[in-house]
Amino acid sequence: MSDKPEPPLSAIPPQLVSLADYADRAAAHIPTAIYEYIVGGGADEISLKRNREVLDRTLILPRVLADVTRGTTETRVLGEQFRHPFMLAPVAFHRLVHPQGELASARAASALEAPMVVSTLSSYTLESIAAELTSPGWFQLYFQQDRDFTLSLVRRAEAAGYSALMITVDASLHGIRNRAQRAGFELPPGVEAVNLRDRPPLPGAVLEPSQSIVFQGMMTEAPTWEDIAWLQARTQLPVILKGVLSPADAVMARDLGIAGLVVSNHGGRTLDCVPSGLELLPAIRRVVGEEMTLLVDGAIARGTDAFKAIALGADAVMVGRPQLYALAVAGAQGVAHMLRILREELEVCMSLAGTPTLADITQDALYRPD
């Protein structure tokens, strides 16, 4: 890590062969405080570590002598054909690590036919990012206190051609991010939430001495189930809720007609001491049935990780931090290379496990020692 980071590489060296290699190399290309903000989790980072631990202790049980010559990683999600099940998760402020930011990421996603979920907190406008995408583009929404402004973001996404709306519901305020605090992280000059430039000023709430700045202050902006229903009635886009862990919440979403869920603990960055999305995925699949779209994220860094998630009930997986590492190291070509690595790793895994299609990847493909 350095306050004088190395510029992005013009060519990818042969030593970069995995996402872990990009993660290791990224520290040299990102200023220290920004790196700590990206890599860190909430509080004691228990959930951050758990995401990886759960994946590592989930094992694959391969079948041999299967004919996999008809193999493919193609799948359909919300009616859209995907070349493979890897999606770029909504990650804020790509310009923190590369001057072309989300525009470079969008070009990489298009080259590798990967869907990209664009964050409300992108550092380029949602319209300019959409213009770079030839692969599916979804828009991630953070609810704003002003309903009209919230709806205006949705209308912009619709007009720009985004095909789904992903509403984050587990991060109405930042978690306790001690690592970023210790590093003194703040947005550098020139990096801002450009989609929120026209946001109306928040009303100046006057709190009584007995009131909490969290409960009666910050959380007055947080959406409720009523807000989700209100917005759902005003858009034709399929709505996905990101950040659901409770099977009870999953049932409520299904009954409301929500199209899909991201089973996720926000990369371990919000509330600490919660389970990983992968742990809750089978239970949520059981209660919502086979028709509802389920995505999962959290420490996805190998093709085998995607295999495990699909076996436990996911339709596709989202990749978060690794896209910033690859972008910092080698720009658009780094992100494209990262996606190609994941797709090829999954193809190898499926071939050696005897599962030629994603539909063949079931819980029977996993080993459960207990």
Image (spheres, helix red, strand yellow):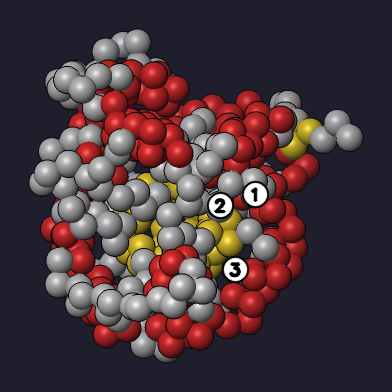
Q: Residues within 10 Å of mark 1 (few under 14, many from 20)?
A: some
Amino acid type of the residue that numbered disc 3 sits on in the rendered structure = Met
**Count of numbered badges drawn on the protein:** 3
Amino acid type of the residue that numbered disc 2 sits on in the rendered structure = Leu
The residue at 67%/63% (across/down) is 246
Q: CA distance from mark 2 to mark 1?
A: 7 Å
Query: Which secondary structure lies at badge 2?
Result: loop
Q: CA distance from mark 2 to mark 3?
A: 26 Å
Q: Which mark is residue 292?
A: 3
Of 304 and 197, the residue lying toward us: 197
According to the picture, the residue beneath numbered tag 1 turns out to be 274
Picture layout, residue 294 above or below residue 338: below
Residue 300, x across and y down, in percent: 51, 37
According to the picture, the residue beneath numbered tag 2 turns out to be 271
Residue 47, x across and y down, in percent: 60, 41
Amino acid type of the residue that numbered disc 1 sits on in the rendered structure = Val
* Pointer 2 or 3: first along the chain: 2
The residue at 25%/43% (across/down) is 186
Say whether residue 221 is left or right of residue 194: right
